Amino acid sequence: MNRLREILSFPGDRVGKARRIAGAIREMGGYRWAGIYDVSPEEIGVIAWSGPDAPAHPRFPASQGLCGAAVQARSTVAVGDVTRDKRYLTTLGTTRSEIVVPILNPATGQVVGLLDVESERNDAFGEGDRRCIEECAAALEPLWSRG
């Protein structure tokens, strides 16, 4: 968490900070992929990611996928086996587990961003992972308020 705050405090552009943060989250948890997304009422679009491949869907309707489900619910969506969830948009063919946490504007409660973390293992995200990823997402809000 301190590493994320440190990255946010450095001068630099929003995309560069988001890229470094995605890398830090991925490394911290030993995850296969981590991405940070912008959310508008119509669309979800990747800002930055860290992992072996770029997302197959860099932009998609805000109503689609597990990301869209997290936006609609305004809460964390965690899936232990994405091959069994109809909402899943295949991005990386070997993804088995995914957790998506919305980032809320504190003044309005509106979803402004998402933190999406993926693993090639089924049931990869335990309660400790969930808490940590949710804390990371909450710490990312300055990317929008200062962005």
Image (cartoon, helix red, strand yellow):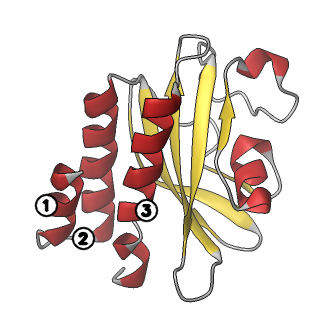
Counting other residues with Cα less than 10 Å from the Cα at mark 3, is it few (<14), some (14-19), or many (20 or more)? Answer: some
Query: Residue drawn at (65%, 35%), measured in percent from left and top?
Result: 78
Q: Nearer the viewer, mark 1 or mark 2?
A: 1
Q: Nearer the viewer, mark 2 or mark 3?
A: 3
Tell me the CA gap for discs 1 and 2.
Answer: 14 Å
Q: Nearer the viewer, residue 131 or 12?
A: 131
Q: Position of residue 137 (x, y in %)?
A: 44, 56
Q: Is residue 97 above or below residue 13?
A: above
What residue type is disc 3 on? Answer: Ala
Q: Position of residue 126 (x, y in %)?
A: 52, 25
Helix, strand or loop for disc 2: loop
Location of mark 3 (residue): 138
**Which is more N-terminal, label 1 or label 3?**
1
Query: Residue drawn at (36%, 79%), measured in percent from left and top?
Result: 147
Location of mark 2 (residue): 13
What residue type is disc 2 on? Answer: Asp
What residue type is disc 1 on? Answer: Glu
C-beta proximity under 8 Å, tags 1 and 2: no
Q: Nearer the viewer, residue 88 or 92?
A: 88
Q: Is residue 19 above or below residue 110?
A: above
Location of mark 1 (residue): 6
Left/right placement of residue 61 relative to residue 37 reads right
Query: Residue drawn at (41%, 70%), measured in percent from left and top?
Result: 141
Left/right placement of residue 136 relative to residue 79 reads left
Q: Position of residue 106 (x, y in %)?
A: 51, 81
Q: Nearer the viewer, mark 3 or mark 1?
A: 3
Tell me which corner region of the image, top left, top right, bottom left or bottom right, holds residue 100.
Answer: top right
**How many numbered marks, from 0 up?**
3
Left/right placement of residue 44 relative to residue 103 reads right
Query: Residue drawn at (60%, 19%), measured in percent from left and top?
Result: 95
Q: Position of residue 13 (x, y in %)?
A: 24, 70
Q: Is residue 130 above or below residue 13?
A: above
